Amino acid sequence: MINFSGAHYPKEAILPAVFFSVRYGVSYRDLEEIMDERGVQVDHSTLNRWVIRYSPLIAEAAMKSK
């Protein structure tokens, strides 16, 4: 289980952003626009921090579930 305590956004906003960034490799500024279209206003630098912080944890959780 990934710990989202201390995050200012719900995990329902963080996870899709991280998955989209890793899967499709879009720029953080483009991802900022995509998230805004979905009603989540978040800065591109925050998206960068999310990917750096959560993508290794997501990968580790996925490897454990195999």
Image: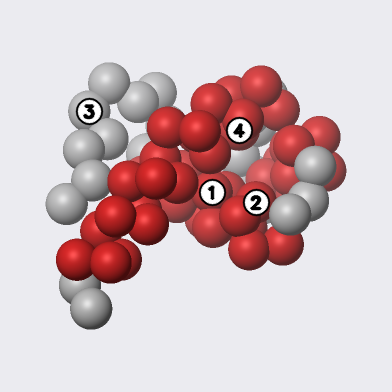
- Image quarter (top left, top right, bottom left or bottom right) of the C terminus: bottom left
Q: Earlier in the sequence, mark 4 or mark 1?
A: 1
Which disc, if any, is residue 47? 4
The Cα–Cα distance between marks 2 and 4, rounded to whole angstroms, is: 9 Å
Q: Where 28 falls versus 35 (above or below)?
A: above
Circle 1: element type: helix
User: To which quarter of the image does residue 49 belong?
Assistant: top right
The Cα–Cα distance between marks 3 and 1, rounded to whole angstroms, is: 17 Å
Circle 4: element type: helix
Tell me, yes or no, whether the two marked residues, 1 and 2, touch with CB atoms within 8 Å. yes
**Colour mode of the rendering:** secondary structure
- What's under tag 4, amino acid-wise? Leu
Which residue is depicted at the point 74% across and 44% down? 31
Q: Which residue is mark 2?
A: 21
Tell me, yes or no, whether the two marked residues, 4 and 3, touch with CB atoms within 8 Å. no
- What's under tag 3, amino acid-wise? Ser
Mark 4, other Cα within 10 Å: few <14 / some 14–19 / many ≥20:
many
Q: Which residue is mark 1?
A: 18
Q: Where 20 falls versus 11 (above or below)?
A: below
- What's under tag 2, amino acid-wise? Ser
